[in-house]
Structure formats: structure tokens, C-alpha cells
């Protein structure tokens, strides 16, 4: 029982450290680009109304959400592996959005090819979903200036704001880290 308590305390500490690390990364990014709205990648904050919507969403941003997105993406891969079926849990649009949200938080670019692979469906299906997400205004395509054959995809300001709204509402059910540490420490 004591080992289980120690394991839970270590896990809570690890989760807290991940949150602190993400906050430090967000602050470093803010210092690097000289903006106060560090949660929004500069490529997402261009444009009139979209910029205002993205700035409003940034006030709801939290560094732990990239970890929740990563976990959701990994959980989806785990289900497919455990149930040994790729057909049961197909939701390529969500996989693409999760992948692009994580990429935006990590400040990395995602090619269309990489996004197709990350969606875990055939390329033709992934390309169809990318077109649908683009038509819905949730992602945008961007040509690679260094290589005309490559095209990148990224969340639009609207898509990023929608992901923030999703994680804002989804995180209401997550126990606060400070509270969970108090709860798992044995009474003396």
C-alpha cells in the first residue's frame, strides 16, 4: 500500500512538473517573440476578426492542454492496438486537429503528408478530411517557400480557438493538481 501511495505522489509530481515545464516554454516563447499573448502562435494570430477571436481564446489557454491533447492522441492509438482493429475507432478529422494543435503548441510545422500519416487512415481519406477541415475554416494550407512540392497545414485562428474552447470545457472534469497532491498524502 505504501508503494502505491508513493507511486501516486510521484505521478502527481510528474504531472505538476510537466505543467511547469510547459508554462516555462510559453514564457520563453513570449520573451522570444515579444508578445503578451504567448498562447497563440504568431502564424495563427494574423487577420482582423480572427485575431480578436484568437486573443480572446488565449486568455483561456493553459500549458497543460498540450499534454491532454498528446494523451488523447496516444489513447486513440492505444485503442487501435489493443482492439486490433483500425476500423472500429476511425475519427481522422479529430486526429488531424489533435496533431495540429500539438504542433502549434510545440511551434513545429506539419506537412500534408505528415498529417495524412498522423490521421491513421489512407491518404485519400486524410486528404478528403483536410479539405473538409479547410472548408470549415479550421485549418489552412501553406506552401513551402523552399520546396514547391511541399505544402504545410496548420490550425487557423478559428481552429486554434475551437481547440482551446474544447480543452477549456473538457478540463473542468480534471482534478486540480494542488488538490490531488493534498488528497494522496497520508494523514498523520
Image: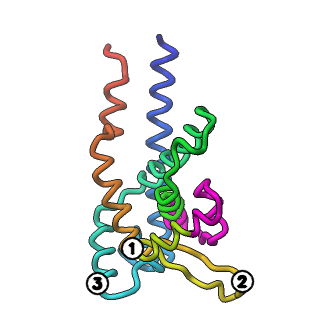
Nearer to us of marks 3 and 1 is: 1
Q: Is residue 103 above or below residue 136?
A: above
- Give the Cα distance between marks 2 and 1: 25 Å
Is residue 25 visible in this depiction of the protein? Answer: no
Judge whether residue 80 is colored magenta: no
Q: Which residue is mark 1?
A: 136
Q: Which residue is mark 2?
A: 149
- Magenta stretch, overall SS: helix
Is residue 143 visible in this depiction of the protein? Answer: yes
Residue at image position (37%, 24%) is 184
Judge whether residue 117 is colored magenta: yes
Q: Position of residue 132 (x, y in %)?
A: 46, 71
- Give the Cα distance between marks 3 and 1: 16 Å
Sort mark 3 into few (<14), some (14-19) or many (20+) by Cα contacts within 10 Å: few
Sort mark 2 into few (<14), some (14-19) or many (20+) by Cα contacts within 10 Å: few
Q: Is residue 161 left or right of residue 92?
A: left
Residue at image position (46%, 79%) is 42
Nearer to us of marks 2 and 1 is: 1
Check the image and tell me how it is coloured.
Answer: rainbow
Q: Position of residue 32 (x, y in %)?
A: 51, 76
Residues rendered magenta in the picture:
102-127
- Give the Cα distance between marks 2 and 3: 31 Å
Between residue 166 and residue 65, name the one nearer to us.
Answer: 166
Q: Which residue is mark 3?
A: 49
Marked residue nearer the N-terminal end (2 or 1):
1
The image's mark for residue 95 is none
Residue at image position (51%, 60%) is 102
Marked residue nearer the N-terminal end (3 or 1):
3
Q: Position of residue 51 (x, y in %)?
A: 33, 81
Amino acid at each position: 500500500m505504501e508503494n502505491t501511495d508513493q507511486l501516486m505522489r510521484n505521478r502527481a509530481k510528474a504531472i505538476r512538473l510537466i505543467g511547469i515545464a510547459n508554462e516555462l516554454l510559453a514564457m520563453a516563447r513570449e520573451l522570444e517573440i515579444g508578445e503578451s499573448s504567448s498562447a497563440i502562435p504568431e502564424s495563427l494570430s494574423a487577420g482582423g476578426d480572427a485575431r480578436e477571436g484568437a486573443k480572446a481564446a488565449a486568455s483561456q489557454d493553459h500549458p497543460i492542454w498540450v499534454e491532454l491533447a498528446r494523451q488523447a492522441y496516444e489513447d486513440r492509438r492505444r485503442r487501435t492496438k489493443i482492439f486490433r482493429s483500425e476500423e472500429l475507432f476511425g475519427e481522422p478529422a479529430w486526429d488531424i486537429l489533435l496533431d495540429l494543435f500539438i504542433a502549434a503548441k510545440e511551434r513545429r510545422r506539419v506537412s500534408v503528408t505528415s498529417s495524412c500519416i498522423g490521421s491513421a487512415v489512407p491518404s485519400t481519406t486524410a486528404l478528403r478530411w483536410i479539405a473538409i477541415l479547410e472548408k470549415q475554416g479550421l485549418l489552412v494550407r501553406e506552401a513551402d517557400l523552399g520546396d514547391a512540392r511541399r505544402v504545410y497545414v496548420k490550425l487557423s485562428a478559428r481552429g486554434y480557438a475551437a481547440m482551446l474552447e474544447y480543452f477549456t470545457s473538457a478540463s473542468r472534469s480534471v482534478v486540480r493538481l494542488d488538490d490531488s497532491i493534498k488528497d494522496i498524502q497520508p494523514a498523520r
